[in-house]
Image (cartoon, rainbow, N blue to C red):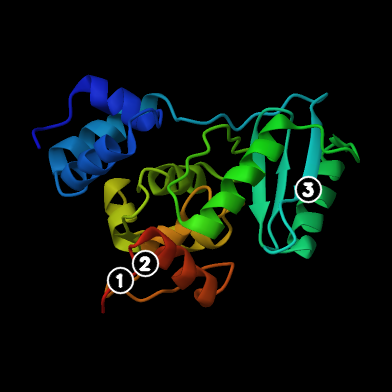
């Protein structure tokens, strides 16, 4: 594949490419320092997701299915978190209430309902999925937002290493920092930290546990052959 065009870059960062085109673009830029630099420059001007919430925003939370212990937190039209346990969901809701936000008991959020269906389907079938209506409010630092933005560019069926994420960010010595940011990813599975692996293919550093990380990679057909 030739170097990424401006059109491809814009649509790649907006997650608007078809899966096959997204994969082809990733296979090129993940090895091309020139295209990595152009992606980095584009992200310095505009990131794909907002990190702001207005004071009157109504919030919702819901478990997305009895079979999987996943909880979603969001507004009427964006997601703030996917957690792997009820206790983790409770921690986020307590924090958000302390910030002045109110929760309603009814899950009157189209994005939570639709995202729940998408994620249940993925866990049952392994079909590719994409959820774009996200908010980075719960991601505390610019560094962590940068880490998760680059992580979100690793497409379905592909993996990258912590060192690669650090290098793409222009911070090649920040591998441990990348791991820390991914460990506290509030949008786990949706921002696919399960696709980030150790330098030698080791499955490390996943909040949902190594067994779940392996299952997710097997569903996507990208479990590393060590």
Label located before the other in sequence (1 or 3): 3
- Relative placement, left or right, of 75 versus 11 is right
Label located before the other in sequence (1 or 2): 2
Asked which quadrant contains residue 178, the reply is: bottom left
Q: Position of residue 102 (x, y in %)?
A: 88, 35
| Residue 224: assigned label | 1
* Residue at the (34%, 69%) spot, across then down: 223
User: Which is closer to the viewer, label 1 or label 2?
Assistant: 1
Q: Residue furthest right?
A: 105
* Residue at the (16%, 49%) spot, across then down: 31
Q: In this picture, is 78 found above or below 195? A: above
Q: Position of residue 151 (x, y in %)?
A: 41, 49
Asked which quadrant contains residue 104, the reply is: top right
* Residue at the (68%, 58%) spot, across then down: 70
Q: Residue furthest front?
A: 125
Residue 115 seen by the camera: yes
- Relative placement, left or right, of 220 versus 66 is left
| Residue 197: assigned label | 2
Q: Which residue is mark 3?
A: 62
Q: Position of residue 119 (x, y in %)?
A: 58, 49
Q: Considering depth in this image, is 164 or 209 the residue closer to the camera?
A: 209
Mark pair 2, 3: CA separation: 29 Å
Q: In this picture, is 165 found above or below 48? A: below
Label located before the other in sequence (2 or 3): 3
Q: In this picture, is 14 found above or below 94? A: above
**Circle 1/circle 2 CB separation < 8 Å:** yes
């Amino acid at each position: 594949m030739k170097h990424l065009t401006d059109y491809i870059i814009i649509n790649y960062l907006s997650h608007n490419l078809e899966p096959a085109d997204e994969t082809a673009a990733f296979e090129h830029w993940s090895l091309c320092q020139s295209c990595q630099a152009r992606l980095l420059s584009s992200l310095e001007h505009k990131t794909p997701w907002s990190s702001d919430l207005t004071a009157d925003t109504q919030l919702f939370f819901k478990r997305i299915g009895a079979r999987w212990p996943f909880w979603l937190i969001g507004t009427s039209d964006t997601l703030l978190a996917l957690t792997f346990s009820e206790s983790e969901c409770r921690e986020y809701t307590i924090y958000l209430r302390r910030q002045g936000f109110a929760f309603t008991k009814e899950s009157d959020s189209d994005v939570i309902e639709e995202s729940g269906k998408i994620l249940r389907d993925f866990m049952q079938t392994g079909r590719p999925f994409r959820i774009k209506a996200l908010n980075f409010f719960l991601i505390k630092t610019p560094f962590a937002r940068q880490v998760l933005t680059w992580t979100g560019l690793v497409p379905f069926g592909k993996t990258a290493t912590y060192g690669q994420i650090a290098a793409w960010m222009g911070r090649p010595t920040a591998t441990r920092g990348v791991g820390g940011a991914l460990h506290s990813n509030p949008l786990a599975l949706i921002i696919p930290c399960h696709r980030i692996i150790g330098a030698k293919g080791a499955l490390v550093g996943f909040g949902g546990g190594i067994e779940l990380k392996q299952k997710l990679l097997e569903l996507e057909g990208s479990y590393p052959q060590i």
